[in-house]
Image (cartoon, helix red, strand yellow):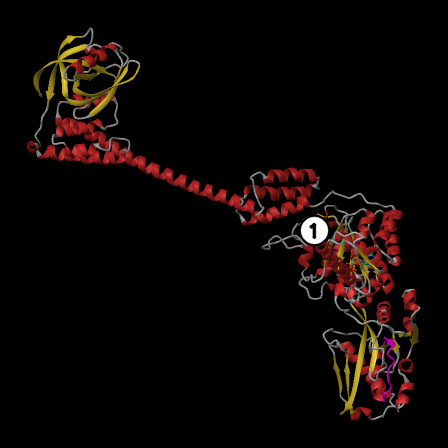
Amino acid sequence: MPDRETMPTFPCIALRGVTVFPGTVMSFDIGREKSLKALEKAMEADKLIYVATQRNDDIQIPTFADMYEVGTLVRVKQVLKIQGDVTRVLVEGICRASVDEIVAEDIFLQGTIVELVQKIDKSQMTLEEKAEFRVVRDAFFEYVGNKHMIDQDAPRKVYNTKDPVLALDIMANELDVNTHIRQELLEEPSFIERMRKVLRIFVEENEISKIENSITEDVKESIDNNQKEYFLKEKLKVIQKELGMGNDGNEHIQWMERLEALNLDEKIKAKVETEINKFAKMGPSSPESSVIRNYVETILDLPWNTEKETNSDLVKAEKILNKEHYGLEKVKERILEYLAVIHLSKEIKGPIVCLVGPPGVGKTSIAKSIAHATGRDFVRMSLGGVRDEAEIRGHRRTYIGAIPGRVITSIKDAGSNNPVFLFDEVDKIGADFKGDPASALLEVLDPEQNNTFTDHFLEIPFDLSKTMFITTANSLDTIPRPLLDRMEVIEVSGYTEEEKVKIAQKYLLPKKLEEHGLTKGNMKVTEKALRDLTNYYTRESGVRNLERKIADLCRKVARKIVSTGDGEYTVRPKNLEEYLGKKAFRYDEAESKNQIGVATGMAWTSVGGDTLFIEVAVVPGSGKIELTGNLGDVMKESAKAAFSYIRAGAKNLNIEEDFYNKYDIHIHVPEGAVPKDGPSAGVTMCTAITSALTGIPVNGKVSMTGEITLRGKILPVGGIKEKVLAAHRAGIKKILLPKDNGRDIEDIPEVVRKDLTFILIEEAGQALKEALVYDEALIKQ
Ligand code: ADP
């Protein structure tokens, strides 16, 4: 039992929800009249008050009977008026106490107080008590470590307090328990018992803390993971957006809406829907999702039902064709016939137009005009260098990096399902290929099949039957046969000088002026200057380089205008060099001298016609034939055929009969960098060799073409028009052609024809008679 010491009378305050332990500092608010009075009283005296907790907080005017029996004698350390009647009191607990005798209860509570002293000397504590105390203290330290909200100064105080009873009270004060338990701990008279009670709570709290911590860790970890994932996903979204593949989460919904609007066939629609659903379930990071996106977007972008209204008015179409292209009468006529058939049959069946001719003659641009004339969109796909079938028909989607073929991509770009679709350079397809691009192309072009053209990537058929396909080629030789069979060939041949000048005046010059921001007044080019431009700065069948040269002129003039401010220039033959530098070609002087062992032939290459010189040198030797100048096999063979013909007829030709034992013959075709082949130089070689062996010069104004047989027969060859135009460009006056090519002469424009003499030959002897200049040989002798 604690000692009882009679104390003097003290003012008393009833507390609500607060218990003050001895040795601790505590603050509470008071506002009730009686409490304020009691405080006032204490402040007047020694600042000591007895405080005890109300059993029931609801009682407004408590008496001693309403308070617990054990309370605390406290010293007021600070009084703070907060607002209105509320005063905050800071007190320090001195000791446990209880009311011995009630002195007054009317104005304020007042009573005599008994101190419940319980002093324990540490040194006299039993081992059990000491051990128990330490356990409590350790539990307390652990408790403090777990709870961050409590007074972090408390452990230090506990450590420094010598009195274990006080230390226990300081520890008990830190417990986060309700008033009821606090009161119980205050009331417990036995120190040991109190230690046990406090310990039990600490241990329990520490356990709870441990569990709490582990829960917190788990939660934190999962939050961390979630956050990490969230963060990464957000980052991914930004990256995808940057790469233009933003998936804002409802992409698939928009796709569904667009799909609905396309009005596709049910089967196709269902297939696309399946893909969209697959995409929706897939994370945006999945590698397959980009393939599906590409797939779906390609399908949604295709002009399934977008059809341009076409113009079937042939008069209007003709006007447009004429407006955009000079000449090309035959071509235009054929095109208009073709359009008329389409108009009548209401479908594009029948052969595919193939425009064949050297570069720069307007094949591409006339195809564009056909699109204008018929009111269709225009797309172009070059087949040059296409080796892989997949370029036309796409890759299967199982392929990494699979994409649709270029046909489907071009149709997508056209934006309508009935464009003019130009396949450029069909003759360059399939030279060296994987798969068979030519057969894929056949499928695209074939009207019987192309209404269900199935790209490997799309795996669903697209109707190409409304598309108007046009192809171009430089030569017919290398177009795969099955393709050629399906084509209607329209030849677009090279231009004469006259035509080129007209095209330059009417089309190229105005076009280039406009492109360079110049007006007619800024730059005039005289007709003579254009003619010189054509003859001395270009040598071609078409007008592509001419167009480039005119663009050069425009740039030069534009620069002058900007730097001098002067805005009118006229380009004349005189100042042409000033603008474009030295003339690049000589003209009208086609090796025009008559020479021994040099004959002029005509070649037809894929870039158009050209003249070709064959040089022969005869040197003492043992009958070897040497051929140089990058000649192909066929050309070599025709050289040998010519040689054999000469050997067989040496006597008639006035050549030593055993010449092949005594001489070596060297045949050279200059411009060795350009590969040459074909049989058409046979007659030219024959002439050059004969000239070299007989010493009779060849007329420099004569040019010839034709295949030669061993017996000297001259066989027909192709490309006559281009060859003759080239010879004309080079200043040739007389042309020797195989007899069977006679009908080709009418294709040659009148302006050219009138400058030339055509001799049709059947036999090599005729060629020699026409080309060799016997008179000069005689003079020399
Ligand atoms: P290709 O396709 O035959 O190689 P392009 O169509 O590219 O030739 O023609 C080259 C340039 O020459 C184009 O600018 C074209 O408009 C122009 N051109 C060719 N022929 C004519 C022509 N008869 N009338 C007007 N311009 C022409």
Q: Is residue 473 visible?
A: no
Residue 22: horizontal and vertical position, in percent? 16, 24
Looking at the rendering, the stretch of residues picked out in magenta corresponds to 694-706
Occupied quadrant, residue 731: bottom right
Q: Quadrant of the C terminus?
A: bottom right
Occupied quadrant, residue 13: top left
Q: Nearer the viewer, residue 102 or 1?
A: 102
Residue 454: horizontal and vertical position, in percent? 70, 51
Residue lying furthest left in this view?
A: 124
Name the residue that disc number 1 marks: 408
Would you say 485 lies left or right of 248 here?
A: right
- Tell me the residue at 62%/38% (across/down): 254
Tell me the amino acid under the disc marked 1. Answer: Ile
- Tell me the residue at 20%/13% (across/down): 40
- Tell me the residue at 80%/77% (across/down): 613
Q: Is 255 covered by the magenta stretch?
A: no
